[in-house]
Image (cartoon, grey):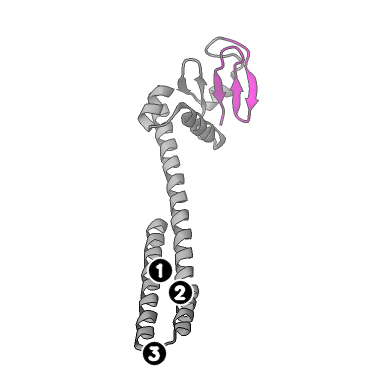
Amino acid sequence: MGKTLGVILIIGGIVVGGIIIALMSVYRGEGSLTSGAATLGIAIGFLVLVLPQLGFGAYLLMRGQQESMVAESASKQRKMLGMIKAKGQVHISDLAIEMHSTREEIQGMLYELVNMGLYSGYINWDEGILYSSEASELRTLDRCKNCNGQLEIAGKGVIRCPYCGTEYFLP
């Protein structure tokens, strides 16, 4: 909505600017205005009517583009979360292909989901597989499911195996 309104305001501002210039040119041509008065009329018209309209239109256009990017990111995160929960385990490469993203983008989205408390599970980065898991099961975990190594806290909501690199995400 914001992008559309922004484009309409910008186009409207350009049209109004054209009308102001045309009117001042016609009045100047008829001899109703001096060249100084026509120039002043154009300047005042642009300052009062055109520039605010163009500025507000540009603001709405940029804000609308930002909102579109946020909505697209949220849609990708919902899709990723749905795929993981539905299948139980998903290869990162499958997620990347399905979502038209890179491995780094998938990793970033996963960490965002963990920070929001929406994903609990674990990932083996070496094998590139994401596993969905119940949070209660992960909270009691002290050994890696992949290599049986002792787990270490790696950050907020993240436990990592220092031996195989598997990361466990707690909500």
The numbered mark, 2 or 1, whose residue comes first in the sequence reads 1
Q: Is mark 1 on a helix, strand or loop?
A: helix
Q: Give the range drawn in magenta.
A: 148-171
Specify the label residue 32 is tagged with. Answer: 3
Indicate whether 66 appears above or below 124. Answer: below
- Residue 94: quadrant of the picture: top left
Depth-wise, is mark 3 or mark 1 nearer the camera? Answer: 3
Indicate whether 45 appears above or below 159. Answer: below
**Residue depicted at x 36% and y 29%:** 98
| The C terminus: image quadrant | top right
Disc 2 from disc 3: Cα separation: 22 Å
Disc 3 from disc 1: Cα separation: 25 Å
Say whether marks 2 and 1 touch (CB < 8 Å).
yes
Disc 2 marks which amino acid?
Leu
Depth-wise, is mark 2 or mark 3 nearer the camera? Answer: 3
Q: How crowded is mark 1: few (under 14 residues within 10 Å), some or many (20 or more)?
A: many
Residue 89 visible in image: no
**Residue depicted at x 56% and y 21%:** 167
The numbered mark, 3 or 1, whose residue comes first in the sequence reads 1
Disc 3 marks which amino acid?
Ser
Q: Does the magenta stretch include residue 156?
A: yes
| The N terminus: image quadrant | bottom left
Residue 146 visible in image: yes
Q: Which residue is label 2 attached to?
A: 49
**Nearer-the-camera pick, 14 or 58:** 14
Q: Which residue is label 1 attached to?
A: 13
